[in-house]
Image (spheres, grey):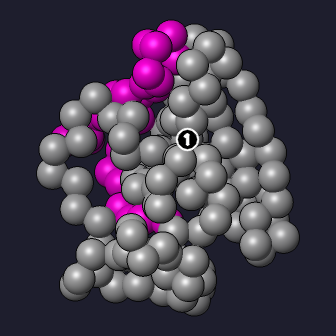
Amino acid sequence: MTMVVTGGCLCGSLRYEVEGEPSAIGKCYCTDCQKESGTGHMTFVGFAATAIRTSGEVRQFVKNGDSGNEVVRLFCPSCGTTIAGYPKILGDVGVIRAGTLDDPAGLVPTFAVYGCSAREWDSPPAGLHVFETLPPR
């Protein structure tokens, strides 16, 4: 049976549905994710990009990541909540912001990226495999 997850923004006007199994659950400590989230990290759930369907008005913000490749972020123009990102370096993978899921129960991150940028007040949990930057391909 295929998993279906749903979620949305803070004001509720932008929603998404994803059908499929997560390819990864992790935490990113890069400075872009810190600024985007307003915290020390961003927890994400990776899915096939084509499986992520949105409804409601959505805007995009595009910026090059450390790899030099574009990262497209989808956000709500009303409340500003970022719901997903599409780092071109990941190919056909989209990353949902875990905090926007309707039911995040059972999410267990298995790794963290950009540990080199982690703040001492928000460091990766003990036992999590931490990559200093991006993991090797």
Residue 17 is one of the magenta-drawn residues: yes
Q: Position of residue 74 (x, y in %)?
A: 64, 34
Residue 22 is one of the magenta-drawn residues: yes
Q: Position of residue 98 (x, y in %)?
A: 37, 45
> At 50% across and 10% down in the image, what residue appears?
13
Q: Secondary structure at mark 1?
A: strand
> Quick check: 128 above or below 27?
below
> Quick check: 4 above or below 36?
above
Q: Amino acid at mark 1?
A: Ala
Q: Nearer the viewer, residue 21 or 26?
A: 26
Please say whether residue 55 is visible from this viewpoint. Answer: no
Q: Position of residue 112 (x, y in %)?
A: 42, 75
> At 37% across and 28% down in the image, what residue appears?
7
User: From which residue to which does the magenta span run?
Assistant: 1-28
> Quick check: 86 above or below 100?
below
Q: Residues within 10 Å of mark 1 (few under 14, many from 20)?
A: many
> At 24% across and 42% down in the image, what residue appears?
104
**Quadrant of the drawing holding the C terminus:** bottom right
Q: Is residue 46 left or right of residue 94?
A: left
Residue at mark 1: 84
Query: Residue 73 falls in which quadrant of the image?
Result: top right
> At 64% across and 65% down in the image, what residue appears?
31
Q: Is residue 2 left or right of residue 123?
A: left
**Quadrant of the drawing holding the N terminus:** top left
Q: Position of residue 117 (x, y in %)?
A: 57, 77
Query: Residue 10 falls in which quadrant of the image?
Result: top left
Q: Is residue 37 left or right of residue 24?
A: right
